[in-house]
Structure formats: structure tokens, C-alpha cells
Amino acid sequence: MPDVILPVLDEAVAIPHVLAGLPAGFNAIVVDNASTDGSADVARRHGAQVVHEPRRGFGAACWTGLLAATDDVVCFMDCDGSFVGTDLIRVAAPVLSDDADLVLGARRASDGSWPMHARVANRFLAWELRRRTRIDLTDVGPMRAMRRVDLLGLGIEDRRFGWPLEMVLRASRANWRIREVDVGYSPRIGRSKVTGTVFGTARAVQDMTRVLR
């Protein structure tokens, strides 16, 4: 079954909930991105494989997790408790059955889970992706699945928040079959460091805009 790469920066409170919610057979790879709250130790105690990436950056953590993965199919998911782990089954299924090369989880948010500034930024980025790729995408969501070897071959360069966007752009240029499936999205556990703050969202949009250029 697929490896699930979980980038982590100070998510000790959320990790037990996230790991307990993963589907049976999905192997958790927690990438500790220089946490200071003991996240790595918590993840180990709850049965996850833990690797370390000292360079701060979402893309850097994702890349290190990808290098540590061994299964043919890999998934990515935020480790803040906002996603339903069992949704990974539906996200990974089209890749496992060779009906798609990249599947993105389109977030269907519950009340209070997605601040307006983050929602607006995501809509703009999704519109830009549709314009450039001609693929009917609605979300640049972090829950996704693809084949490990194919992803390694895409040559993604961004190591910050532009990683998810660059992945889709490069996959489109490589004529990957890209699909969306709906996934749940709830309020995160603990304090948000990115989309929950205006500054964090602005930083993510800045990184993604650089990729678009």
C-alpha cells in the first residue's frame, strides 16, 4: 500500500490524531522540518517512520519524504488534523488502478476550517492553473497521490510553498492524467503557521507566484 508523506513543523499535538486516522496498510513517513516541540519523538512513539529535513520549507520537507519513500505510489497530506485520513483511499485509488497519474484532493470545507483570505488565494491559484493547463481544477490542495518514480522524474525545483503548484504545472506539461476527488476539510488542531494567518497565506502566494513566473 502507498507511503504517506507528512511534512511536520511543530505538530506534536496533532500527530497522534493524524496517525491514528490513516487507513490500514498506508505507511506514514513523518518529515520533521526542524520542529522544536518534540514532534519527531511523538511520531516515533505512535509508529511512524521519521526522517529529518533541517532546511525550513514545505517543498524541502516533501522532497526529503519522497526520497525516503519506497512504495510505487506515494501520497502527501498535511499533518495538522484538518484532513480525514481515510479519504486517502479514494485519492490513491485512481493511481493504484492506473486510471490517473496525479490525483488531487479538492477540499470541501466545514465551517471555520478555511479562512476567507486563504480561500480567496486558493481560488485565484486554481483559476490560474485552469487557464494554463486547460484542466478543470478547483483546488491546489495538499492531499494528493501519484507514482513515486514519476514524481522524482518531474524535476520539481521549488523547496518552499511553490512545491504543490509546480508539481501540477510540470505534470500537465508531461501530459499526466490529472484528476480531482472531493475530500473533507476541518479546522486544524493547534496553531496555524500558514493559511490560518494573513502573513502565512501571503508568503505562500508569493512563493507560488514566483513559480508561475
Image (tube, helix red, strand yellow):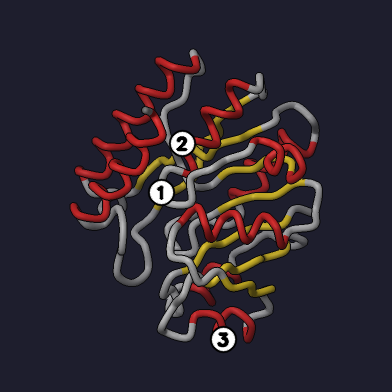
Q: What's the amino acid at mark 2? A: Leu
Q: What's the amino acid at mark 1? A: Phe
Q: Which mark is residue 31?
A: none
Quadrant where the N terminus sits is bottom right
In whole angstroms, how far apart are the C-alphas of marks 2 and 3?
31 Å
Q: Residues within 10 Å of mark 3 (few under 14, many from 20)?
A: few
Please tell me in which quadrant of the rendered image residue 20 appears: bottom right
Q: Position of residue 158 (x, y in %)?
A: 48, 45
Determine whether label 1 and label 3 are within 8 Å by CB.
no
Q: Position of residue 36 (x, y in %)?
A: 41, 83
Look at the numbered disc 3 and give the secondary structure of its residue: helix
- The residue that label 1 is drawn on is 161
- Foreground: 158 or 68? 158
Q: Which mark is residue 41?
A: 3
What's the residue at 46%, 25% (across, down)? 137
Look at the numbered disc 2 and give the secondary structure of its residue: helix
Question: Which one is closest to the eye, mark 1 or mark 3?
Answer: 1
- Foreground: 164 or 122? 164
Q: What's the amino acid at mark 3? A: Asp
Relative to 202, is 125 above or below?
above
In whole angstroms, how far apart are the C-alphas of marks 1 and 2?
8 Å
Does residue 136 appear left or right of residue 177 in this picture?
A: left
- Foreground: 155 or 106? 155
In whole angstroms, how far apart are the C-alphas of marks 1 and 3?
25 Å
Does residue 94 appear left or right of residue 193 in this picture?
A: right
Q: Position of residue 168 (x, y in %)?
A: 53, 31
What's the residue at 55%, 80% (across, down)? 40
- The residue that label 2 is drawn on is 165
Look at the numbered disc 1 and give the secondary structure of its residue: loop
Which of the marked residues, 1 or 3, is nearer the chain's N terminus?
Answer: 3
- Foreground: 51 or 80? 51
